[in-house]
Amino acid sequence: MVLVEFVSGLIFSILVGALVGIEREHVRATEHFKGLPIFGVRTVILFSILGFFFTFLAMYINAMYLVAIGALTALVVTTIVYFSNVLIKKYTGSTTYIAMMAVFFLGAFVGLGGYTNYLIAAIGSIVITGFLAGRNKLRSISKRIEQGEIFGAIKFGIIAFIILPLLPNRTIDPLGIFNPFQIWYVVVIVSAIYFVSYVLMRLFSEKGLLITSMLGGLVSGSMITFQLANWLKRNKKLLPAAATGVMLTIIAGLIGDLFVIAFVFQKFDLLLKLLPALSIAIVFLLAVIFVLYKDHKRIPNLKLNVRSPFALKPALEFGAFYLALLGIGTVLGNLLGALGLYPLTVLASLVSSSTSIISTVSLYSLGKITLGTASQLVLVAIVVAFLTKMFWASYSKNIAFMRRVAFATIAGSAIICAIYALQAFLF
């Protein structure tokens, strides 16, 4: 049994090291690194085996200090090679040497045995190889990031990951809705989703309007529609591109709403109630894009400008609006019942449909409204978001564009309402 574990671990540690080693061997062959004593595939594999061997032996004879000895051995080797490069070749790069220590510890995880530790080693090997191979891409990304975005992310990170754990996780108001921890937790998660979409949009802005419209729709569908309308106002040839972009922002918004309901609030009963209508609406919009705008190759690259949602000010604005809707919704629900929430949802969705939807799901999570009322309010917010696209499209002063957007939004809204009504009637 011990022999089988040793052999299987040895083979797996070789594979873990080989993945990183092949990438390093490829780098060593480039002109920039020729002549440098940089680690190649065999050396990297040996580092992984070294970590495995010392850890396996330590577990076998119950002497965990052997892992420290192995790590110290690996550190001495990498340090000697590093200073050799500095003194002889005047090369001060340290990425490979840090990676070698990481590979040693990946081998150590394999030496611990068990599926989980093997999985950690495999994932770690893939991540390290990705970072090493993406050297030029990461440098290109860092050049695109503006200083204001960095400081905004730092400020938000302090509030999200330092202050959040300190907030009380209980309601502190007479209505029983203001839980500081839960409210700010929602703000953090939703803002993080927007931020990921924003970063992807920035990274893929050169790949074409279709991708950036889709990603931009997760950040601010109204802003993207307004920009597309302005471009079309200056250049009528952008009509197919602008119309396609608007429909993709709508699709992205629907997907984002479903994601928040499912993974932020984990209200799968609400998700299942909304899924048929929204899925068919997405299929309809994709069909419209396919039928009317087949020639995607002629759609130009246009840079979409959206401010980073991962800064402090947008997060606080979102949190304040979210809390206000939550409080007003609770008061109206207590005074007027569910009927009082419908006009509030319409008005709130004119400003921010995503915040309106999140507030609705929060009320449902708190038990303030029923499943049926929650699903209807979400659909009201979505339909209002659909229809407001016509308002932003009107800035183009282009009748053909306005007609296409109106057709997609009105027909999409009708499909959502019809499917939801049919579902309610049948079930």
Image: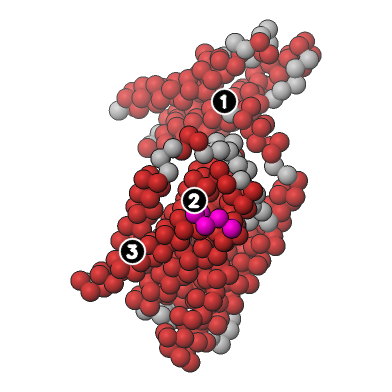
Q: Quadrant of residue 416?
A: bottom left
288 relative position to 177: left or right: left
Q: Residue furthest left?
A: 426
Can residue 173 be found in the magenta stretch? no
From this view, report whether residue 5 is shown above or below residue 193. above
* Residue drawn 46% across the image and 76% down it: 363
Q: Residue furthest front?
A: 399
Q: Is residue 266 visible?
A: no
244 relative position to 78: left or right: left
**Could you tell me if the residues under marks 2 and 3 are in contact, i.e. CB atoms within 8 Å?**
no
Query: How crowded is the residue under tag 3: few (<14 C-alpha within 10 Å), some, or many (20+)?
Result: some
**Could you tell me if the residues under marks 1 and 3 are in contact, i.e. CB atoms within 8 Å?**
no
Image: magenta residue range: 397-401
Mark 2 vs mark 3, foreground winner is 2
Numbered label tally: 3
In the picture, the quarter occupied by the N terminus is top left
Mark 1 vs mark 3, foreground winner is 3
Mark 1 vs mark 3: which is more N-terminal?
A: 1
Residue at which label 2 appears: 243
What label sits on residue 104 in the rendered view? none
- Residue 61 in the image: x percent, y percent? 45, 30
Residue at which label 1 appears: 133
* Residue drawn 42% across the image and 44% down it: 293
Distance (Cα) linking label 2 and label 1: 38 Å
Residue at which label 3 appears: 415
